[in-house]
Image: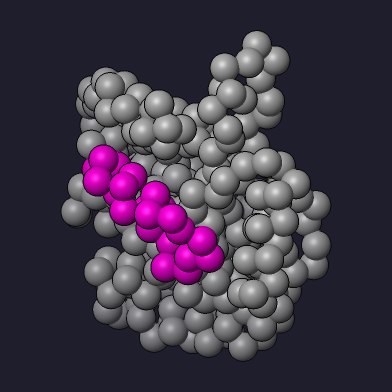
Amino acid sequence: MREIIVEKLKTIESDENIRILLAVESGSRAWGFASPDSDYDVRFIYVRNTEDYLRLNTVRDVIERPISDVLDINGWDIIKTLRLLYRSNPTLFEWVSSPVVYLDNGFRDRIHEIMPKYFYAKRGLYHYLSMAKSNYREYLKGETVKAKKYFYVLRPILACKWILDKHSPPPMLFSDLVAAELEPELKPEVDMLLDIKMNAPELKLIPRVDSINSYLDESIEMIENLLDRMSDEQHNDWDELNSLFLEIIGC
Protein backbone atom coordinates (compact mmCIF):
# COMPACT_ATOMS: atom_id res chain seq x y z
CA MET A 1 0.00 0.00 0.00
CA ARG A 2 2.89 2.34 0.67
CA GLU A 3 3.92 2.23 -3.00
CA ILE A 4 0.35 3.06 -4.07
CA ILE A 5 0.21 6.02 -1.69
CA VAL A 6 3.55 7.42 -2.86
CA GLU A 7 2.46 7.05 -6.48
CA LYS A 8 -0.79 8.93 -5.75
CA LEU A 9 1.18 11.70 -4.08
CA LYS A 10 3.45 12.00 -7.10
CA THR A 11 0.37 12.21 -9.32
CA ILE A 12 -1.03 15.01 -7.17
CA GLU A 13 2.26 16.90 -7.49
CA SER A 14 2.06 16.64 -11.26
CA ASP A 15 -1.67 17.41 -11.58
CA GLU A 16 -1.58 20.40 -9.22
CA ASN A 17 1.86 21.72 -10.20
CA ILE A 18 3.05 21.66 -6.58
CA ARG A 19 5.91 20.24 -4.55
CA ILE A 20 5.06 18.11 -1.52
CA LEU A 21 7.28 18.95 1.44
CA LEU A 22 6.02 16.29 3.82
CA ALA A 23 3.44 13.49 3.62
CA VAL A 24 2.50 11.35 6.60
CA GLU A 25 -0.09 8.99 8.06
CA SER A 26 -2.38 10.80 10.49
CA GLY A 27 -5.00 8.32 11.75
CA SER A 28 -5.18 5.05 13.64
CA ARG A 29 -2.25 3.58 11.70
CA ALA A 30 -0.04 6.37 13.05
CA TRP A 31 -1.57 6.09 16.52
CA GLY A 32 -0.64 2.41 16.63
CA PHE A 33 -4.04 0.75 16.90
CA ALA A 34 -5.31 0.15 13.37
CA SER A 35 -8.10 -2.39 12.83
CA PRO A 36 -7.86 -4.98 10.04
CA ASP A 37 -10.16 -2.82 7.91
CA SER A 38 -8.82 0.63 8.90
CA ASP A 39 -8.32 3.01 6.02
CA TYR A 40 -5.21 5.10 5.34
CA ASP A 41 -5.39 8.76 6.40
CA VAL A 42 -2.68 10.50 4.38
CA ARG A 43 -1.93 14.17 5.02
CA PHE A 44 0.62 16.35 3.26
CA ILE A 45 2.09 19.85 3.28
CA TYR A 46 2.95 21.40 -0.07
CA VAL A 47 4.36 24.51 -1.71
CA ARG A 48 3.41 26.10 -5.03
CA ASN A 49 5.62 27.95 -7.49
CA THR A 50 6.74 31.38 -6.29
CA GLU A 51 4.65 33.16 -8.95
CA ASP A 52 1.46 31.60 -7.54
CA TYR A 53 1.97 33.50 -4.29
CA LEU A 54 2.27 36.81 -6.15
CA ARG A 55 -1.03 36.64 -8.04
CA LEU A 56 -4.15 38.63 -7.15
CA ASN A 57 -6.41 35.65 -7.88
CA THR A 58 -5.12 33.32 -5.20
CA VAL A 59 -5.84 29.59 -5.31
CA ARG A 60 -7.23 27.43 -2.52
CA ASP A 61 -4.86 26.56 0.29
CA VAL A 62 -6.16 22.98 0.57
CA ILE A 63 -5.94 20.07 -1.86
CA GLU A 64 -8.39 17.21 -1.39
CA ARG A 65 -9.06 13.96 -3.18
CA PRO A 66 -12.30 11.93 -3.04
CA ILE A 67 -12.36 9.54 -0.09
CA SER A 68 -12.38 5.85 -0.98
CA ASP A 69 -12.91 2.77 1.17
CA VAL A 70 -9.18 2.52 1.85
CA LEU A 71 -7.68 5.97 1.27
CA ASP A 72 -8.38 9.45 2.61
CA ILE A 73 -5.83 11.96 1.30
CA ASN A 74 -5.59 15.74 1.52
CA GLY A 75 -3.04 18.47 2.16
CA TRP A 76 -2.37 22.04 3.27
CA ASP A 77 -0.46 24.80 1.49
CA ILE A 78 2.68 26.03 3.27
CA ILE A 79 1.05 29.40 4.01
CA LYS A 80 -1.91 27.75 5.72
CA THR A 81 0.51 25.45 7.55
CA LEU A 82 2.65 28.25 8.96
CA ARG A 83 -0.37 30.33 9.93
CA LEU A 84 -1.73 27.35 11.83
CA LEU A 85 1.64 26.85 13.50
CA TYR A 86 1.51 30.47 14.69
CA ARG A 87 -1.82 29.59 16.35
CA SER A 88 -0.34 26.42 17.87
CA ASN A 89 -2.63 24.10 15.92
CA PRO A 90 -2.49 20.63 17.57
CA THR A 91 -3.28 18.77 14.35
CA LEU A 92 -0.18 20.21 12.70
CA PHE A 93 1.99 19.13 15.63
CA GLU A 94 0.63 15.60 15.14
CA TRP A 95 1.33 15.53 11.41
CA VAL A 96 4.93 16.62 11.89
CA SER A 97 5.52 14.01 14.60
CA SER A 98 3.84 11.10 12.79
CA PRO A 99 5.83 7.85 12.96
CA VAL A 100 4.68 6.93 9.44
CA VAL A 101 6.28 9.15 6.78
CA TYR A 102 5.58 8.70 3.05
CA LEU A 103 7.54 11.65 1.64
CA ASP A 104 9.95 14.13 3.22
CA ASN A 105 12.48 16.39 1.53
CA GLY A 106 14.01 17.64 4.78
CA PHE A 107 11.09 19.85 5.72
CA ARG A 108 10.25 17.87 8.86
CA ASP A 109 13.62 18.46 10.49
CA ARG A 110 13.51 22.12 9.51
CA ILE A 111 10.08 22.81 11.00
CA HIS A 112 10.89 20.70 14.08
CA GLU A 113 13.53 23.29 14.94
CA ILE A 114 11.01 26.07 15.45
CA MET A 115 7.80 24.26 16.46
CA PRO A 116 8.48 24.20 20.23
CA LYS A 117 8.45 28.01 20.26
CA TYR A 118 4.85 27.97 19.04
CA PHE A 119 3.43 25.31 21.35
CA TYR A 120 0.84 26.62 23.81
CA ALA A 121 -0.39 24.16 26.41
CA LYS A 122 -3.81 25.74 26.89
CA ARG A 123 -4.70 25.46 23.20
CA GLY A 124 -3.60 21.84 23.09
CA LEU A 125 -5.66 21.06 26.18
CA TYR A 126 -8.78 22.68 24.72
CA HIS A 127 -8.35 20.73 21.49
CA TYR A 128 -7.90 17.31 23.06
CA LEU A 129 -10.48 17.85 25.81
CA SER A 130 -13.11 18.90 23.25
CA MET A 131 -12.32 15.82 21.16
CA ALA A 132 -12.60 13.54 24.19
CA LYS A 133 -15.87 15.05 25.43
CA SER A 134 -17.65 14.96 22.07
CA ASN A 135 -16.71 11.32 21.40
CA TYR A 136 -17.52 10.29 24.97
CA ARG A 137 -20.92 11.96 24.91
CA GLU A 138 -21.86 10.58 21.50
CA TYR A 139 -20.48 7.03 21.57
CA LEU A 140 -19.74 5.70 25.06
CA LYS A 141 -22.86 6.33 27.15
CA GLY A 142 -24.94 3.31 26.08
CA GLU A 143 -24.99 -0.20 27.50
CA THR A 144 -23.15 -1.43 24.38
CA VAL A 145 -20.55 0.66 22.59
CA LYS A 146 -18.17 0.43 19.64
CA ALA A 147 -14.86 -0.81 21.00
CA LYS A 148 -12.85 1.55 18.79
CA LYS A 149 -14.56 4.62 20.22
CA TYR A 150 -12.85 4.13 23.56
CA PHE A 151 -9.58 5.04 21.87
CA TYR A 152 -11.05 8.24 20.47
CA VAL A 153 -11.62 9.32 24.07
CA LEU A 154 -8.72 7.66 25.87
CA ARG A 155 -6.08 8.97 23.50
CA PRO A 156 -7.04 12.67 23.83
CA ILE A 157 -7.43 12.33 27.61
CA LEU A 158 -3.94 10.86 27.88
CA ALA A 159 -2.68 13.58 25.53
CA CYS A 160 -4.07 16.20 27.93
CA LYS A 161 -2.31 14.54 30.84
CA TRP A 162 0.95 14.48 28.86
CA ILE A 163 0.65 18.21 28.20
CA LEU A 164 -0.05 18.92 31.87
CA ASP A 165 2.86 16.76 33.04
CA LYS A 166 5.48 17.52 30.39
CA HIS A 167 4.43 20.89 28.92
CA SER A 168 5.17 19.64 25.41
CA PRO A 169 3.19 18.31 22.43
CA PRO A 170 1.98 14.74 23.05
CA PRO A 171 3.35 11.88 20.95
CA MET A 172 1.14 10.25 18.34
CA LEU A 173 1.71 6.64 19.41
CA PHE A 174 -0.95 5.49 21.83
CA SER A 175 1.52 3.10 23.46
CA ASP A 176 3.77 6.04 24.42
CA LEU A 177 0.84 7.85 26.04
CA VAL A 178 -0.25 4.72 27.90
CA ALA A 179 3.26 4.07 29.21
CA ALA A 180 3.62 7.65 30.46
CA GLU A 181 0.15 8.61 31.65
CA LEU A 182 -2.29 5.71 32.20
CA GLU A 183 -2.84 4.44 35.74
CA PRO A 184 -1.40 0.89 36.02
CA GLU A 185 -4.63 -0.62 37.35
CA LEU A 186 -6.42 0.27 34.12
CA LYS A 187 -3.86 -1.25 31.76
CA PRO A 188 -5.47 -4.76 31.69
CA GLU A 189 -8.80 -3.30 30.55
CA VAL A 190 -7.10 -1.08 27.99
CA ASP A 191 -5.01 -4.01 26.71
CA MET A 192 -8.23 -5.99 26.31
CA LEU A 193 -9.80 -3.17 24.31
CA LEU A 194 -6.66 -2.81 22.23
CA ASP A 195 -6.74 -6.50 21.33
CA ILE A 196 -10.37 -6.17 20.22
CA LYS A 197 -9.65 -2.98 18.27
CA MET A 198 -6.71 -4.45 16.36
CA ASN A 199 -8.23 -7.86 15.62
CA ALA A 200 -11.90 -7.14 14.98
CA PRO A 201 -13.81 -5.08 12.39
CA GLU A 202 -14.21 -1.35 13.00
CA LEU A 203 -17.89 -1.71 14.01
CA LYS A 204 -17.34 -4.32 16.75
CA LEU A 205 -19.78 -3.76 19.65
CA ILE A 206 -18.92 -4.61 23.26
CA PRO A 207 -20.52 -4.03 26.69
CA ARG A 208 -19.58 -0.70 28.23
CA VAL A 209 -16.47 -0.95 30.43
CA ASP A 210 -17.57 0.82 33.62
CA SER A 211 -14.09 1.13 35.14
CA ILE A 212 -12.84 3.01 32.09
CA ASN A 213 -15.96 5.17 31.93
CA SER A 214 -15.42 6.17 35.57
CA TYR A 215 -11.80 7.01 34.78
CA LEU A 216 -12.90 9.15 31.85
CA ASP A 217 -15.49 11.00 33.95
CA GLU A 218 -12.91 11.80 36.62
CA SER A 219 -10.24 12.79 34.11
CA ILE A 220 -12.51 15.12 32.15
CA GLU A 221 -13.58 16.90 35.34
CA MET A 222 -9.98 17.23 36.52
CA ILE A 223 -8.77 18.67 33.20
CA GLU A 224 -11.69 21.10 33.01
CA ASN A 225 -10.93 22.40 36.50
CA LEU A 226 -7.27 22.93 35.65
CA LEU A 227 -8.13 24.69 32.40
CA ASP A 228 -10.40 27.12 34.22
CA ARG A 229 -7.45 28.25 36.32
CA MET A 230 -4.90 28.53 33.49
CA SER A 231 -3.91 31.99 32.31
CA ASP A 232 -3.79 32.98 28.66
CA GLU A 233 -0.48 32.60 26.88
CA GLN A 234 1.66 35.06 24.96
CA HIS A 235 2.19 34.72 21.20
CA ASN A 236 5.57 34.69 19.52
CA ASP A 237 6.03 36.99 16.58
CA TRP A 238 5.89 36.15 12.88
CA ASP A 239 9.55 36.73 12.03
CA GLU A 240 10.78 33.15 12.12
CA LEU A 241 7.75 31.85 10.23
CA ASN A 242 8.13 34.52 7.56
CA SER A 243 11.80 33.62 7.17
CA LEU A 244 10.97 29.93 6.79
CA PHE A 245 8.31 30.71 4.19
CA LEU A 246 10.72 32.81 2.11
CA GLU A 247 13.37 30.10 2.41
CA ILE A 248 10.95 27.44 1.16
CA ILE A 249 9.72 29.38 -1.85
CA GLY A 250 13.26 30.38 -2.76
CA CYS A 251 13.20 34.11 -2.06
Q: Is residue 1 left or right of residue 228?
A: right
Q: Residue at x 36, y 81 (%)?
A: 187
Let me know if residue 109 is in the magenta part. Answer: yes
Residue 161, can we see it?
A: no
Indicate whether 156 appears above or below 64.
below
Nearer-the-camera pick, 9 or 211: 9
Q: Is residue 125 left or right of residue 136?
A: left
Q: Name the spot of residue 189 as percent of width and height, x first.
A: 44, 82
Nearer-the-camera pick, 135 or 98: 98
Q: Is residue 234 left or right of residue 24?
A: left
Let me know if residue 183 is in the magenta part. Answer: no
Q: Name the spot of residue 190 as percent of width and height, x first.
A: 44, 79
Q: Residue at x 68, y 25 (%)?
A: 59
Scheme by which the image is coloured: one colour
Indicate whether 117 appears above or below 74.
above
Q: Residue at x 33, y 67 (%)?
A: 177
- Quadrant for residue 224, please give it: top left
Q: Is residue 26 left or right of residue 178?
A: right
Image quadrant holding the N terminus, namely bottom right
